[in-house]
Image (cartoon, rainbow, N blue to C red):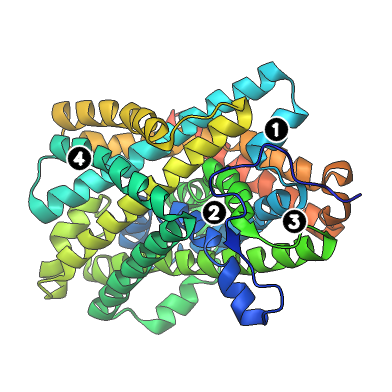
Amino acid sequence: MDPTPSSDPSLPDSHRTISVPGGAGFWRKLLAFSGPGYLVAVGYMDPGNWATDIEGGSRFGYTLLCVILLSNLMAILLQALSARLGIATGRDLAQACRDHYSRPVAVGLWLLCEIAICACDLAEVIGTAIALNLLFHLPLVWGVVLTGLDVLVVLWLGRHGFRWLERLVISLILLIGVCFGLEILFSHPAVRDIVGGLWPDPQIIYQPHMLYLAIGIIGATVMPHNLYLHSSIVQTRKYVQDAPGRREAIRFASIDSFTALMFALFINGAILVMAAATFHSHGRHDVAEIADAYKLLSPMLGVGMAGVIFAVALLASGQNSTLTGTLAGQIVMEGFLNLRLQPWLRRLITRGLAIVPAAFVAGYYGPQGTAKLIILSQVVLSLQLPFAVIPLVLFTNDRRKMGEFVSPRWLQVLAWATALLILILNLKLVLDFFGLTGAPAS
């Protein structure tokens, strides 16, 4: 069986617009395929992950580095499956769900995914607003409102082609990487402790709050919208639509996402290492919020620019995440409902649903309220995750859909094990949040 692309392609304005040179060598082809993985990697370093990494490093030093490594490996596997689905079938995950399930089920899955995208956008809005507050002393409410202007960025990039969006995202990722590279240099972490932190420590299981933070790191790692996003944007490449062409595309897309997600591993690990070397090593085990970390970095490190560099990285992270959120929203709506809206209108709807509650909480409750809102947004994402992960694993294991590109047996076993572990840990995180297990919920 040789799956053929659908007549209603995902992201029609960008579908197969980036050519892959046929007779080129390995590196030129890899360059042509590189890009989608970095758009996906943005979701693994968004502001929603920062607080958990900061608290984990401040409270427990380098111990939870192994959890960041494990969660990243699971993400690599699931994103590889997402790319495989999009390339092999010519359908993104949302379209595949619409094809497979009844109309009521598809609409229900769409509604759940829309809630998850709004929750993710909420964390990004708040993260960007906090960065603007730290850098320019802009009130949180005004910072929240200003995040709506990124619609103009999306419109401008849309006129110049999909490659320009990839370039901007990669540039911002590199900026974040440079910022945290500097923070690592300033904080002088112990290399032995970093290496030791990559090895699992049994006390993670036995200490309740450490286990809670570990679950939070894993539970917030795989974003549901990233699975829909990746299965769509790999189809922006124009390669030969036969079995060898798709096989090659799957290989290069997997390399692309692996490389990008390893960079995300560096960013998340660097946040925790910085917190461990700066706060934990100096007896400050109580730093759990982004604003607190910003205020303490410069005086504790003795480097005046340390706090500013941290805030610049946060701003780049928040802005990057909002750009990819636009695409995810468009893909989900078009895929599940076959309903096409102008990208700017879609963006205004999504951003409006995030701005209203964020502005209310920022104005009424202040910074403490926005921190709790970020946590709530991660719980909402956790609740939605099974409805994206399970269909993805089912579809990529189905030979009728995938043909010769069906996941091999070893990959199926790893996929189900990964899905089961993530689902169990997310369930634990949600139960803890609502105080149903007796574990810490803050």
Which residue carries the number 3 mark?
414
Alpha carbon distance from label 2 to label 1: 36 Å
Give the amino acid at mark 2.
Ile
**Disc on the earlier residue, 1 or 4:** 1
- The residue lying at 61 percent from left, 33 percent from top is 335
Q: Is residue 51 left or right of residue 144?
A: right
**Disc on the earlier residue, 2 or 3:** 2
Give the amino acid at mark 3.
Leu
- Nearer the observer, 47 or 95: 95
**Disc on the earlier residue, 2 or 1:** 1
Alpha carbon distance from label 1 to label 4: 35 Å
The disc at residue 97 is 1
- The residue lying at 92 percent from left, 49 percent from top is 1
Q: Is residue 17 left or right of residue 45?
A: right
What kind of element bears circle 3?
helix
The disc at residue 205 is 2
- Observer-side mark, 2 or 3, equals 3
Q: Is residue 33 above or below residue 138?
A: below
Which residue carries the number 4 mark?
146
Which percent across, then down, holds residue 69? 53, 65
Q: Residues within 10 Å of mark 1 (few under 14, many from 20)?
A: many
Q: Are discs 2 and 3 less than 8 Å apart at CB?
A: no
Residue 380 in sight here: yes
Q: Quadrant of the C terminus?
A: top left
Residue 442 in sight here: no
Alpha carbon distance from label 3 to label 1: 22 Å
- Nearer the observer, 109 or 249: 249
